[in-house]
Image (cartoon, rainbow, N blue to C red):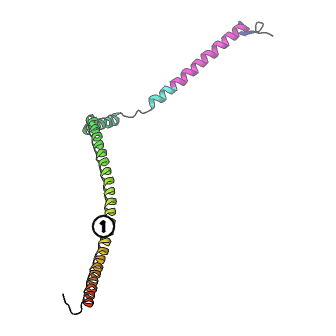
Amino acid sequence: MSLADAELTIGGVKLKGIYIAVVLSLATTIGGGVWTASSLYSRLEAVENRKIPSVKPVIERVTLIEQSLEANDVSQLQGKLAELGVNLKTIAEQQEKLLQVSDKLISLEKDIEAMKATVTKAELIADNMKDIESKFKTLNREVSELWQGLDYVSNPLNKP
């Protein structure tokens, strides 16, 4: 039995198989459309029933933020940043100079230590010279006394 041979009699009206297929397709399409419309309507009702929060607090917060930005004078921030950059460069240059002075100071300290060692050596030499000088005086006195003794022995009566 094929669709073309099938017949249905409803209230004295004979419907052939192809008409039944067309009516059935049309009925399911309309049913699907009704179901989709019903689903859409229920979603819209759910959205309408949803309470939308007030935007007044958000607007107030934005206003407060704008006021605080104006109070902090953000418009002049670029100028202040430039001034800070110049100050930072000046500080870096002064630090460089201080490092150079520190290096020179370390060099001078080394030179002073070397000079202290030289002065200590010179003091030792001077002390040794004093000892040598006193020994020379003693030696000169002894030589002088020896000559006097020899003079006396060679001329005991002291005749000229």
Q: Nearer the viewer, residue 135 or 146?
A: 146
Quarter in which the N terminus is drawn: top right
Above-or-below relation of 64 to 29? below
Question: Residue 27: x, y in percent?
Answer: 63, 14
Q: Which residue is at 67% across, 10% downward?
A: 22
Q: Is residue 75 left or right of residue 35?
A: left
Of helix, strand and loop, which one carries label 1? helix
Q: Quadrant of residue 119?
A: bottom left
Q: Is residue 82 left or right of residue 7?
A: left
Q: Nearer the viewer, residue 33 or 64?
A: 64
The 10 Å Cα crowd at callout 1, few under 14, some 14 to 19, many 20 or more, is few
Quarter in which the C terminus is drawn: bottom left
Please give the range of residues in magenta: 15-41
Above-or-below relation of 120 to 90? below
Q: Quadrant of residue 84?
A: top left
Question: Residue 46: x, y in percent?
Answer: 48, 30
Query: Residue 144 colored magenta?
Result: no
Q: Is residue 16 visible?
A: no
Above-or-below relation of 87 to 127? above
Q: Amino acid at mark 1?
A: Val
Q: Which residue is at 31% across, 37% downward?
A: 65
**Total number of numbered labels?**
1
Q: Is residue 9 left or right of residue 132?
A: right
- The dominant secondary structure in magenta is helix
Q: Residue furthest right?
A: 1
Question: Residue 136: x, y in percent?
Answer: 29, 78
Q: Which residue is at 30% across, 80% downward?
A: 135
Query: Residue 16 colored magenta?
Result: yes
Q: Which residue is at 31% across, 61% downward?
A: 112
**Location of mark 1 (residue):** 119
Above-or-below relation of 120 to 58? below
